[in-house]
Amino acid sequence: GDIVCGATLKDNTTSAISTAIIKVVGGVPQVKAQSGTPAVGVAGATFASFGNPAINTSDDTAFEATLTTGPGSVTTSNNLGIWADDNTGTLQLITRIGSNATGTTASFLTFSDPVYNNNEAVAFRATLKVATGQATSTTATGIWSTSSGSLALVARQGSQASGCPTGATFSAFTELALADQGGVIVMATLNANTAAGVITTNNLGIWAVDTTGTLQLIVRTGDILNGKTVTGLAFLPALSTVNGQSRSFDQATGDLVYFATFSDASTAIFNVVFP
């Protein structure tokens, strides 16, 4: 029941306004990070603002943050990063924009808020800088995770989609979760490709990383389930009050449930249990 949240603070003496990440453990608020304070992993830099934080069962936290431009040689091209606690509860810099995006020749340009598991691993969606030798507009989005112990590329826009015919490539990543066992679970769309048989009626799917670190296709529109054709999928529906993981999967095992719509307008809920 412990929580983490973003907060705006007012200094009672100077009336100065700052922002912070507040962790509440056992009902006691603790400042995890605050604007104007040193940013771990970037010598001389200070935090400026924060995204939506995440917390795990060890009360460790992860968040996206913006740095103040100027101190620590911070510019608008390297002022955004992802931070997370390690297994000792010590905050660590995971990566920053402007740095190399692992698994590519490109550099990071933007990040989403991270999701965080109980092994102190993070996953996030990021965009890459579009430039010669880096990324194009059709290869600039991907999913990265530290589930394997170091930052690794899980899937990238324009790359081959596992479990699909050769030539079927990822177009966009719309929903993201991170289980303790296995790894990333993601909903994604595919690029239209007649040769690979990808059309609007079968271009949406759910993929999950198994315990060997391999991304596997779970289900895709156009599949036949219970003798019916799947026409729609819902896994982590967006809610106005929630930005992050939801209850549609088991945090410990990665087992998941999803909602499917069929061509005859009927619907069903499927439970996926991993060995």
Image: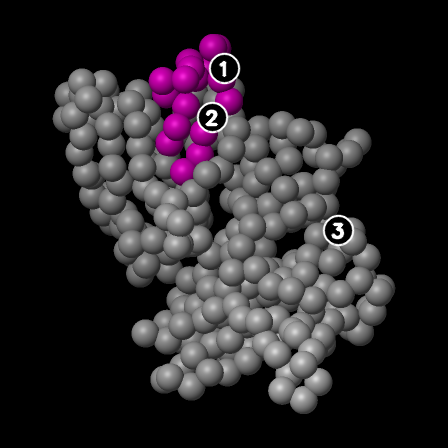
Distance, label 2 to label 1, CA atoms, is 9 Å
Magenta range:
187-205
The residue tagged 1 is 193
Distance, label 2 to label 3, CA atoms, is 28 Å
The residue tagged 2 is 190
Mark 1: few/some/many CA within 10 Å (<14, 14-19, 20+): some
Residue occupying image coordinates x 24% and y 28%: 261
Amino acid carrying label 2: it is Leu
Label 3: which secondary element: loop
Label pair 2/1, CB-CB below 8 angstroms: yes
Q: Which image quarter holds the N terminus?
A: bottom left
Name above or below for residue 259 compared with residue 51.
Answer: above
Label 1: which secondary element: loop
Residue occupying image coordinates x 57% and y 33%: 157
Q: Earlier in the sequence, mark 1 or mark 3?
A: 3
Give the farthest residue toward the top: 194
Residue occupying image coordinates x 77% and y 34%: 131
The residue tagged 3 is 98
Q: Nearer the viewer, residue 160 or 249?
A: 249
Q: Is residue 125 something one can see in this rendering?
A: yes
Residue 69 located left or right of residue 17: right
Distance, label 1 to label 3, CA atoms, is 32 Å
* Residue 233, label in figure: none
